[in-house]
Image (cartoon, helix red, strand yellow):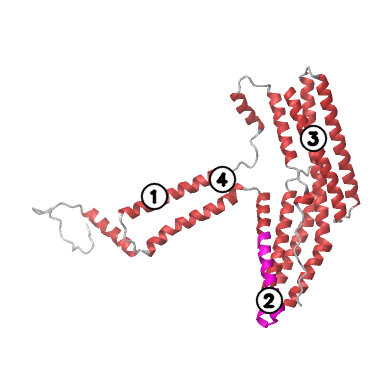
């Protein structure tokens, strides 16, 4: 009874799609989806690389027209996959930027978006050029093109973008620390406690954390100010990252202090 | 009443010894059987029941799946949380202290979410040295 089976099959297909799509649509944030996509593209990239290396070895060994064509097909596939990998990575970075509190720094947010979008546009054009390539020699030239773009344009822009992320997120967290500690102090002034010495020590500890954090941020901002308008070198990014991460570690010390003061209240 | 393949004759009532089958039901049965025959389905009550049951189950499964997988995009407002806590413990703390606790909790969560961009977002390094000997 094929018709009867066909009727039964439709609900099952519907159910299968529901299982696959529902978590994707409802269960994950945009950042999680971007991360998953990047992981997926990375897996596909590794597969494409394996095929490319195999066909390349076969072509270099046999040097036949067929092996050359196979090498052409797998190299093209590999370059297209590299392009997808970069695109998914840039989209992930872009999505991460949306999680940052840019209050008062909207111009910097717009700058990061512009820089990322420029590279996504380049990759779109690159994909079209790769798709229309007809020979292995063209693909070799295209790989040089992508490598040059990556080295001279994409990475310096990316270092700038990530440096801005580092500084902005650290600064916004320090602001958050300031308001939270201020709330505690307001509460303490409205509800005087017996443990005045503990509270005084708590205040000095928090003040130390704020000062140290601020000092790290200022240093990172000084380095950021020396970077290019739209680009940064890797060592600059590295230095900024070291300072901001020291600031973040310092701020994390406040977690225990806040728990401590809550026990007293 | 017109029946398929039955000549139109005046209704004179049932003859003696004849059963009084309702003509409408007979006609519907025939139509249903013809309908299923056209679709190459040989229906039995069991099969139809299973099909109906399966469809019902699928709809219920899909609905429950959507409901279960829906996560709140943001945390519930702290005020609501406070109300629940207050109900749970009548001898509770002052509301402003609970608000403060919630603020501190939110701040600690934001600290936990801080990332090192240099290590967590390092760019991919694909091999682009495409050369053939």
Q: Is residue B81 left or right of residue B4?
A: right
Helix or strand or loop: what does disc 2 sit on? Answer: helix
Q: Nearer the viewer, residue B80 or B20?
A: B80
Q: Look at the image and give the residue range highlighted in magenta.
A: A41-69
Chain for numbered disc 3: A
Q: Nearer the viewer, residue A27 or B128?
A: B128
Q: Is residue B13 magenta?
A: no
Helix or strand or loop: what does disc 4 sit on? Answer: helix
Q: Quadrant of the N terminus of chain A?
A: bottom left
Mark 4, other Cα within 10 Å: few <14 / some 14–19 / many ≥20: some
Q: Nearer the viewer, residue B36 or A136?
A: A136
Labels 2 and 4 share a subunit: no
Labels 2 and 3 share a subunit: yes
- Residue A52 location, x and y as percent? 69, 70
Disc 4 target residue? B69
Q: Main secondary structure of the magenta part?
A: helix
Disc 2 target residue? A58
- Residue A61 location, x and y as percent? 70, 79
Helix or strand or loop: what does disc 3 sit on? Answer: helix
Q: Which mark is residue B53?
A: 1
């Amino acid at each position: 009874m094929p018709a009867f089976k066909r009727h039964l099959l439709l609900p099952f297909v519907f159910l299968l799609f529901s299982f696959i799509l529902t978590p994707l649509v409802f269960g994950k944030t945009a950042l999680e989806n971007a991360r998953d996509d990047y992981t997926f593209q990375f897996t596909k990239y590794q597969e494409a690389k394996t095929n490319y290396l195999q066909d390349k070895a076969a072509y270099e060994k046999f040097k036949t027209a067929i092996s050359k064509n196979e090498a052409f097909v797998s190299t093209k596939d590999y370059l297209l996959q590299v392009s997808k990998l970069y695109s998914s990575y840039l989209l992930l970075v872009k999505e991460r930027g949306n999680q940052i509190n840019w209050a008062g720094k909207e111009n910097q947010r717009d700058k990061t978006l512009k820089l990322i979008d420029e590279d996504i546009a380049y990759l779109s054009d690159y994909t079209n050029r790769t798709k229309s390539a007809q020979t292995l020699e063209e693909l070799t030239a295209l790989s040089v093109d992508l490598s040059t773009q990556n080295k001279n344009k994409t990475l310096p822009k990316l270092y700038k973008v990530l440096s801005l992320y580092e500084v902005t997120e650290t600064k916004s967290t320090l602001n958050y620390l300031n308001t939270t500690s201020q709330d505690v102090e307001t509460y303490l002034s409205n509800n005087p406690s017996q443990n005045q010495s503990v509270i005084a020590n708590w205040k000095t500890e928090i003040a130390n954390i704020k000062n140290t954090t601020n000092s790290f941020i200022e240093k990172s901002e000084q380095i950021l100010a020396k970077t290019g308008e739209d680009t940064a070198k890797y060592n600059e990014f590295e230095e900024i990252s070291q300072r901001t991460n020291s600031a973040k570690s310092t701020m994390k010390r406040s977690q225990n202090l806040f728990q401590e003061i809550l026990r007293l209240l | 009443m017109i029946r398929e393949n039955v000549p139109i004759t005046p209704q004179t009532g049932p003859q003696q010894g004849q059963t009084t089958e309702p003509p409408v039901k007979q006609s519907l049965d025939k139509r249903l059987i013809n309908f299923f025959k056209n679709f190459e389905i040989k229906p039995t009550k069991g099969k139809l029941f299973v099909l109906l049951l399966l469809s019902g189950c699928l709809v219920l499964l899909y609905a429950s799946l959507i409901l279960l997988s829906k996560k709140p995009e943001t945390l519930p407002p702290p005020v609501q949380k406070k109300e629940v806590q207050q109900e749970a413990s009548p001898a509770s703390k002052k509301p402003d202290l609970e608000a403060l606790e919630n603020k501190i909790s939110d701040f600690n969560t934001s600290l936990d979410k801080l990332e090192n961009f240099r290590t967590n977002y390092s760019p991919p390094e694909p091999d682009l040295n495409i050369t053939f000997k």
